[in-house]
Amino acid sequence: MDLTRLSIDNDGRLYWDGKPVEVRRRLMMSRQQVIGASIIAFFIVVAAIASAIQATATMSNWACRTGLTQCDAPGASAKTAPRYSGLAATAATRRASDHRRRWLPCR
């Protein structure tokens, strides 16, 4: 193979025997390939949106648990809270309130 005829100028263009080498290759896809690529792109966008929503919910939950924002359980009031009596009931009430604090969204 004779590489002495191959050269590159200062701008990085390739030459063979002093003539510029042009490389052009267009991407050609059939109609089915275009439809398939469009469907895949659509589902990628849907997944990205779902990931953003999940990240927002997780961030809100984390902010509530760490005390960065104030958390209130919507619809949870003293009237609707179950009433327990006795020492075992106190632990059950504490667990229920811990669960509400951890998992219910902030306002």
Image: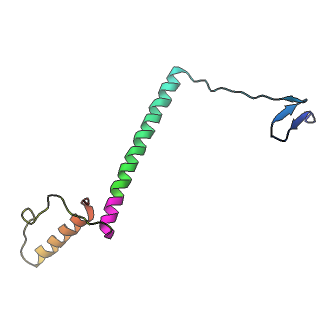
- Point out the image quarter for the N terminus: top right
Q: Nearer the viewer, residue 30 or 56?
A: 56
Q: Is residue 91 above or below residue 26?
A: below
**Residue drawn 47% across the image and 35% down it:** 41
Residue farthest toward the top in the current orientation of the protein: 31
Residue 29 to residue 85: above or below: above
Which residue is farthest bottom? 87
Q: Is residue 24 above or below residue 10?
A: above
- Is residue 53 toward the left or the right of residue 6 in the image? left
Which region is colored magenta? 59-67
Classified by dominant secondary structure, the portion drawn in magenta counts as helix
Q: For the C terminus, give its image quadrant.
A: bottom left
User: In the rendered view, does 41 fall on the left or right side of 18?
Assistant: left
Q: Residue at x 57, y 24 (%)?
A: 29
* Colour theme: rainbow
Q: Position of residue 47 (x, y in %)?
A: 41, 43
Point 7% across, 71% down: residue: 84
Q: Is residue 3 above or below residue 61?
A: above
What residue do we see at 18% from left, 58% from top?
A: 74
Name the spot of residue 28 as percent of width and height, x first: 61, 23
Q: Is residue 65 magenta?
A: yes
Mark count: 0
**Percent position of residue 76, x then y:** 14, 61
Residue 105: image x %, image y %? 26, 59
Is 87 on the left or on the right of 22, as rendered? left
Magenta stretch encompasses residue 57: no
